[in-house]
Amino acid sequence: MKKIFLITAITCFSAQIYAQELNNKFKAIPPKDAEKKEVVPPKETAPKENPPAPVEKPAPLQVNPDELFKDTNRYKQEANVEGIFYRRNQFLGNFNTTAVTSTIMYRDAAFVDGDKVKVYLNDKVIEPEVFLTGDFKSVKINLEKGINKIDIEALNEGFASPNTAEFKVYDDKGQVISSSEWNVGTGYKAVIVLVKE
């Protein structure tokens, strides 16, 4: 047992000495590029001509609801009755799209109570009378370049005021452009504006 221990100790000791000798003899080989000089990039010179000015996109077409609802021939004026918030026109927003067509789906958003609406596209009637139920009904419209104003007029309030509806607007690829609800009184309109780019 002593012999095995002695042989192991001598082997380890001699291996360590040999390893130290290798470290002393080792010399690193310099890389090939060590003798090359550092390359300095050339200085940039200013262009002789002025670059073209960036082209600014025109501001997107927008409809101002305050200006829109001033037209008393098309929009009933707001009734200032305290506590009754729905006797007014409701602007549901401007939405930009590149779609060729759009589908508007609508249904009664609350209790199905006999609400009826009329749908206009750019002040022309496209659906003269729609009875709102719990199921979605839809109208598909061809969008013109620029502003496409969709008015949804409440023909009545059913037997539970106001005229309530949920709507969804889809582009021609089936993507939702907008989704919301309206609450308007008889004769008032909810307005959605789609701007075809």
Image (cartoon, grey):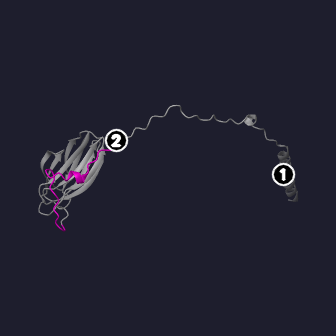
User: Residues in magenta?
Assistant: 59-83
Q: Picture quarter containing residue 31? A: top right
Q: Residue at x 84, y 54 (%)?
A: 8
Q: Quadrant of the C terminus?
A: top left
Q: Between 115 and 18, which is closer to the camera in this rendering?
A: 115
Q: Residue at x 84, y 53 (%)?
A: 12
Q: Picture quarter containing residue 41? A: top right
Q: Which label belongs to residue 16? A: 1
Question: Which amino acid lies under the numbered mark 1 shown in the image of this protein?
Answer: Gln
- Is residue 182 toward the left or the right of residue 23 in the image? left
Tell me residue 120's x, y (percent): 16, 47
- Is residue 48 toward the left or the right of residue 97 in the image? right
- Looking at the image, the residue that sits furthest to the top is 48
Placement of 105 over or under 48, stated as above or below:
below
Tell me residue 118's x, y (percent): 14, 50
Question: Which amino acid lies under the numbered mark 2 shown in the image of this protein?
Answer: Pro
**Where does label 2 land, which residue?**
58
Q: Residues within 10 Å of mark 1 (few under 14, many from 20)?
A: few
Q: Between 185 and 32, which is closer to the camera in this rendering?
A: 185
